[in-house]
């Protein structure tokens, strides 16, 4: 069979298109970016006005921590985030399920949701202040409203994708409506709802800063805005980094929940 | 409990899919329904179990279901329809939970049906860990758990490979022999029909009507692979169906 030069191995054409997550590469990317920034600011090819030196940002952070102000800012911010996002996501999931199940609610609410989705919620802050007062109410409302729309869209999409044969099966065994919703629709929609929550909670963090633009003495957003108006880049970056870390933590928590709740998936 | 189909007819959007179907399903027998694709056999099964309503005619229930039957008309689906987030035992438990059974009683039923389908060792497994044959066994266990008066089986073995199909047919024969059940068994596989059916109903192509009802008297337990009498019956069924199937095949192209 292997006579002369006519035999050659078949060229490999498969492979690729299947990214897997490699541990530590993400950390390495962060470290690289920070090192380049540090080197640039020290060597002078990045001016202090362009970007603060990472080591200075760290020093400012340590200062903030030691003064005890860190938790004074973080506390109110976290409670606003948790309360606002919980209200928004809670109502969003409920409304999303109703849209997914009832024709009239779907026909009535889908256009409404489509209409309020593109509204920049920040633009409505003055309105919320009038409705809910300058205190915590308007901040909760803004965050809740911002998380509501993406959650609704993700949820009813997820409910639409629940395997209809499973629902028919439930009916054929005489399960009650409520049992079908609780034991078949809800768990079936869970993957979609959770990936929707990833997006809505990131939006909640973005809106947190917006919510603290008006009448907030403490809070990460207030801290960032104050630093920004004083052009204090080190403090501005401390605030931004805290928000980033918050985002990473939220995403990790959802990842944890997914691994727990969605263990049945492949 | 017997079932009677009384002159059932139906159409979808102006296309008549079945006409004048009358049939008796006596208790303790397996009635197989065969026919070319698109003749409405699965639709007929959905009528029998009340998942859809026929435009003409009705399905009648004669006598009352046996004592302790939680769900008299129970389906077994082609694609198993197991909840992927529940274990084998959990999937069986699902259909018992709405009936307010005491916990001990529910556990007893689950253990009993899992034992009858040889699934006891798999009680804690998730559906994704099971082969197709095992999944369908779980679905059969789930159906047995509600103690049905009539089992409505919609091509239950069509998604399985031929070896698994043989094994599951043996299982079904065993189950029936130990405790005869009533079933309507829809299939396009004539071999399954002659192995499991006491009666084989041949439907014509659209609009589906009953062409012939073939009775097979050999007891289920004695029907072996390659039995000459079954071969003859199967050949007879095939001659009945061949022209219909060919016509149905050509018809689909013109739709």
Image (cartoon, grey):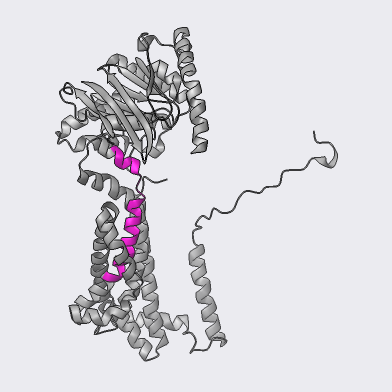
Q: Quadrant of residue B59?
A: top left
Quadrant placement of the N terminus of chain B:
top left
Q: Determine whether B122 is above or below A100 in the image.
A: above
Principal SS element in the magenta part? helix
- Foreground residue, A211 or A29? A211
Is residue A261 visible from the viewing direction of this image?
no
Q: Quadrant of residue B140?
A: top left
Q: x, y percentage for residue B238?
A: 48, 18
Q: Is residue B145 left or right of residue A241?
A: left
Specify whether residue A168 is painted magenta: yes
Q: x, y percentage for residue A108?
A: 27, 61
The residue at the point 49 percent across, 26 percent down is: B245
Q: Quadrant of residue A251?
A: bottom left
Specify whether residue B98 is painted magenta: no
Q: Is residue B65 left or right of residue A258?
A: left
Provide the residue span drawn in magenta.
A145-169
- Foreground residue, B167 or A3? B167
Q: Which residue is farthest front? A: B14
- Foreground residue, A64 or B13? B13
Q: x, y percentage for residue B210?
A: 37, 21
The residue at the point 19 percent across, 26 percent down is: B69
The residue at the point 35 percent across, 36 percent down is: B11
Q: Determine whether B110 is above or below A219 in the image.
A: above
- Foreground residue, A172 or A264? A172
């Amino acid at each position: 069979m292997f006579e002369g030069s006519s035999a050659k191995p078949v060229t490999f054409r498969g492979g690729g298109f299947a990214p897997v997550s490699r541990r530590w590469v993400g950390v390495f990317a962060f470290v690289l970016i920070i090192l380049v920034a540090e080197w640039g600011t020290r060597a002078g090819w990045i001016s202090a006005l362009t970007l603060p030196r990472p080591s200075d940002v760290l020093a400012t952070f340590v200062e903030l921590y030691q003064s005890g102000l860190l938790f004074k800012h973080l506390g109110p911010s976290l409670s606003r985030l948790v309360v606002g996002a919980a209200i928004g996501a809670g109502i969003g999931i409920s409304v999303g399920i109703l849209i997914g199940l009832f024709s009239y609610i779907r026909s009535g609410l889908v256009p409404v949701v489509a209409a309020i989705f593109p509204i920049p919620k920040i633009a409505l802050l003055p309105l919320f202040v009038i409705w809910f007062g300058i205190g915590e109410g308007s901040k909760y409302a803004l965050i809740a409203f911002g998380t509501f729309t993406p959650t609704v869209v993700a949820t009813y999409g997820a409910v639409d994708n629940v395997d209809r044969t499973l629902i028919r099966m439930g009916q054929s065994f005489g399960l009650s409506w409520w049992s079908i919703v609780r034991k078949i629709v809800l768990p079936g929609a869970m993957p979609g709802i959770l990936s929707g929550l990833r997006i809505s909670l990131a939006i909640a963090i973005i809106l947190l800063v917006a919510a603290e633009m008006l009448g907030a003495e403490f809070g990460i957003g207030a801290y960032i805005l104050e630093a920004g108006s004083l052009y204090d880049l080190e403090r501005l970056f401390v605030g931004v980094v805290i928000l980033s870390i918050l985002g990473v933590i939220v995403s990790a928590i959802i990842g944890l929940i997914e691994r727990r709740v969605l263990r049945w998936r492949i | 409990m017997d079932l009677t189909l009384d002159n059932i007819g139906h159409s979808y959007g102006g296309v008549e899919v079945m006409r004048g179907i009358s049939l008796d399903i006596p208790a303790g027998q397996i009635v197989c329904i065969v026919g070319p694709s698109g003749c409405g056999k699965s639709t007929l099964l959905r009528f029998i179990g009340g998942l859809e309503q026929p435009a003409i005619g009705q399905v009648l229930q004669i006598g009352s279901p046996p004592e302790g039957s939680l769900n008299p008309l129970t389906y077994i689906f082609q694609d198993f329809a197991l909840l992927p987030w529940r274990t084998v035992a959990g999937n069986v438990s699902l259909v018992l939970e709405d009936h307010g059974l005491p916990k001990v009683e529910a556990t007893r039923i689950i253990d009993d049906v899992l034992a009858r389908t040889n699934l006891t060792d798999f009680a804690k497994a998730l559906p994704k860990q099971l082969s197709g044959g095992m999944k369908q066994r779980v679905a059969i266990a789930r159906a047995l758990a509600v103690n049905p008066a009539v089992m409505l089986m919609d091509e239950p073995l069509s998604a399985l490979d031929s070896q698994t199909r043989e094994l599951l047919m043996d299982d079904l024969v065993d189950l029936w022999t130990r405790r005869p059940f009533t079933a309507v068994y829809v299939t396009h596989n004539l071999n399954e029909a002659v192995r499991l059916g006491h009666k084989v109903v041949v439907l014509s192509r659209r609009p589906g009507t009953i062409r012939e009802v073939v009775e097979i008297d050999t007891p289920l337990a004695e029907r072996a692979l390659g039995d000459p009498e079954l071969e003859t019956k199967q050949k007879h069924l095939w001659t009945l169906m061949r022209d219909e199937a060919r016509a149905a095949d050509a018809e689909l192209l013109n739709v």
